Image (cartoon, rainbow, N blue to C red):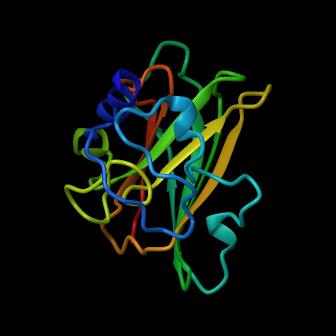
Amino acid sequence: MATMALLLSGCGGDSENASNTSADQTASASPSQSMGEMDGMAMGDPSATPANKVADAKVVKGSFKLLDTRPPGMDDVKGTAWLAQGPKGTTVTVSLTGLKPGERYMSHLHAQKCSAENGGEHFQFEKGGATTPPNEVHLMFTADKSGTGMMTVNNDRKTGEGAAAIVVHPMAAQDNRIACADFAF
């Protein structure tokens, strides 16, 4: 339970749980589930079509900017994020360099621009609902040996203009938001 609370609280979430309603999700997480059990949730598919290549979709792009809350040694992180809204819902892709090789990272859509409290609270399809997919959009990935990380995730619902930014942070230090990218609709 402490692990899940740490995961959710570090980036502005809470520990509420709701049922899983998305066809793209493979499991629902409760506050008592461990990080290993969260791995079964749909938080990314490296073989999915990247958001910037989704056909018949409105695509917005954002460039990651470093945040003051980043942990030491993360000054070279750069990257891009794309959010596509098409006939099958929302697709989000992140691509980053300058990460620590072999380390795990998490990204979340946020409801505010980066300049407002580093993105503020997580974007939720149902505000006050579950802090896990499918009510939130999470991307989990591991940096390769060159420090590059890329992941795409799909959600069968559209965010509209409610998802204003995306934040990335290390799995081991949830309070240390590394970078944030704004989406301009």
170 over 130 or under it: above or below: above
Residue appearing at x 38%, y 70% in the figure: 159
The residue lying furthest to the top in this view is: 72
Residue appearing at x 52%, y 52% in the figure: 27
Give the quadrant of the N terminus. top left
Residue 79, percent from left and from top: 60, 44
Query: Residue 142's quadrant in the figure?
Result: top right
81 over 10 or under it: above or below: below
Image mark count: 0
Towards the viewer: 97 or 102: 102
Towards the viewer: 109 or 8: 8
Residue appearing at x 57%, y 31% in the figure: 36
Give the quadrant of the C terminus. bottom left
**Left or right relative to 17: residue 66:** right
**Left or right relative to 176: residue 129:** left
134 over 145 or under it: above or below: below
Tell me, yes or no, if residue 50 can be seen here: yes
Residue 101, percent from left and from top: 71, 22
**Left or right relative to 66: residue 144:** right
Towards the viewer: 159 or 133: 133
Residue 38, percent from left and from top: 52, 39
The residue lying furthest to the right in this view is: 145
The residue lying furthest to the left in this view is: 128
**Left or right relative to 106: residue 50:** right
Query: Residue 164's quadrant in the figure?
Result: bottom left
